[in-house]
Amino acid sequence: MIENNNTSVTVNNETINTIPTENVNVKAKKSLPKIIPIIIDIIAVVFIINLFGGSSIENIAIGCAKTVISDQLKAPSSAIWHDCKIIDKDSYGRYLVYINVEATNSFGGYVTNEYLVVVKDVKKSGDFNYNPNFAVQSVTSSTYDLVVDVTKNLNSWNEPTR
């Protein structure tokens, strides 16, 4: 049996003194919105994936193509990479990459150029191969389709490596 007279409570014939709870303010504990822990978990997962080899082979291929172009620039450190994307991939490990880069020329002025680059045998380590004679072709919007076909033909597209 429980009796309550605001100053004591009797439970099973034992009296326990209590403290009156009148005028006691209890504030609710503020907690983070439920979405915050989910966002933190997502960020952690993305970080771990990138830390342990989350870079896709396609992103590595784009980086390899940038390396090829950087080697041809007068001032590689001035490069501002704009649109860089894989246009096509063949059955023999070749990637056709479109590169749009702005960099300083011999006169110190910035110029924007567009290139198609074929890289092959791209590894997760960043190692790759390319044909130094035909891997890089300059392209414009008006010659794009033609240059894609020519670049593929010059680089033995969809043919086994010779």
Image (cartoon, rainbow, N blue to C red):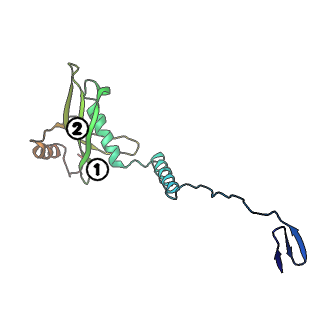
- Label located before the other in sequence (2 or 1): 1
Of the pair 48 and 1, the residue shown nearer to us: 1
Counting labels gives: 2
Position of 121 compared to 45: left or right?
A: left
Image location (x, y in percent) of residue 106: 21, 20
Q: Is residue 51 above or below residue 105?
A: below
Q: Residue 145 at x, y = what percent? A: 11, 46
Rounded to the nearest angstrom, the CA distance separating label 2 from label 1 is 22 Å
Which quadrant: the C terminus? Answer: top left
Disc assigned to residue 100 = 2
Which residue extends farthest top?
107
Residue at the location (17% across, 46% down)? 152
Q: Residue at x 33, y 40 (%)?
A: 63
Q: Quadrant of residue 28?
A: bottom right
Which quadrant, please, contains the N terminus?
bottom right
Name the residue type under label 2: Asn
Question: Residue 29: x percent and y percent?
Answer: 63, 56
Please state which of residues 112 and 153 is positioned toward the viewer in this rendering: 112
Image point 37% across, 45% down: which residue? 123
Residue at (24% x, 34% y) in the render:
101
Mark 1 lies on a secondary structure that is: loop
The image quarter in which residue 75 lies: top left
Q: Of 22 and 55, which appears nearest the observer?
A: 22
Where is 108 relative to 44, above or below? above
Q: Residues within 10 Å of mark 2 (few under 14, many from 20)?
A: some
Q: From this viewpoint, which residue is outermost toward the bottom?
A: 1
For disc 1, the marked residue is 93
Q: Quadrant of residue 147?
A: top left
Q: From this view, report whether residue 104 is shown above or below residue 146.
A: above
